Amino acid sequence: MAVDPLIELRDVNKYYGTAHVLKDIDLTVGKGEVVVVIGPSGSGKSTLCRTINRLETIESGSIRLDGRPLPEEGKSLARLRTEVGMVFQSFNLFAHKTVLQNIALAQIKVRGRRREQAEQRARELLDRVGLADQADKFPAQLSGGQQQRVAIARALAMDPKALLFDEPTSALDPEMINEVLEVMRQLAHDGMTMVVVTHEMGFARSAANRVVFMADGRIVEDRTPEDFFTHPESDRAKDFLSKIL
Ligand code: ADP
Ligand code: MG
């Protein structure tokens, strides 16, 4: 089945000073696809996410979103950031705003929605992530897993075309990991296009259409989860899997 591409990176190279951190990256993420990115620490996974969202510049290559080149700067860049939501390891919620305000704020400021409309949407999304009864709490009153689900709701509130997750469960206590993965599984099931950096191999096996394995700034393997986990081809991937499985 041919999928319509949503995110397309062609021959992307990025440097930090003299450090070459993304090397000849070619990656296509189709609409509705879930791509899990794995690899050793320092291999460039976070940089890849930040590059897709133009939080980082690139030295060469091209990135397209839904057929259009990514803008370099200006107003269109702000719009791009609303089209590709990002969820980080640290939830980055506003500590002095309630859960409801956290989800409503950008809708009002960036999307120009009226307060009532934004809060209505925030309540719908809180319900979707299983937190309908937490709207008036402050982030510090919630568990880490609940805070991360608020962060996901906040990203969804912008009606993004895709969501990027950078180790969304790495800062959580073990008993909270599943509630976050469950919300992500549901999003995948509902057709959201997702790029997910994670060490949760169970999630990769069950929810990913493809696994991308990175090492030293390169995409070394880009395969289905079945293929990747049963027959890793590269020594780097074999070595990585032997350490984590
Ligand atoms: P990963 O997410 O796979 O652990 P990163 O994308 O964070 O890897 O990092 C890739 C490489 O880029 C690493 O060598 C890291 O030290 C370097 N790096 C990341 N961010 C910066 C930065 N802001 N300035 C300089 N080097 C960086
Ligand atoms: Mg990282």
Image (spheres, rainbow, N blue to C red):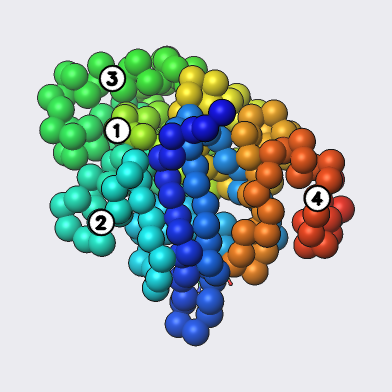
Element class at badge 1: loop
Name the amino acid type tagged 1. Answer: Met
Mark number displayed over residue 158: 1
Q: Nearer the viewer, residue 220 or 197?
A: 220
- Is residue 4 depicted above or below 54 in this figure? above
Q: Nearer the viewer, residue 221 or 178?
A: 221
Residue at (69%, 53%) from the top-left corner? Answer: 221
Element class at badge 2: loop
Name the amino acid type tagged 3. Answer: Arg
Whichever of callouts 3 and 1 sits on the residue coming sooner in the sequence is: 3
Q: Mark 2 points at which residue?
A: 71
- Structural crowding at the residue carrying mark 2, measured as other residues with C-alpha within 10 Å and reported as few (<14), some (14–19) or many (≥20): some
Mark number displayed over residue 121: 3
Q: Position of residue 63 (x, y in %)?
A: 38, 56
Name the amino acid type tagged 4. Answer: Pro
Indicate left or right for 1 with 134 as reference: right
Q: Name the residue under label 4.
A: 232
User: What's the CA distance linking mark 2 and mark 3?
Assistant: 28 Å
Is residue 140 something one can see in this rendering? Answer: no
**Residue 124, quarter of picture:** top left
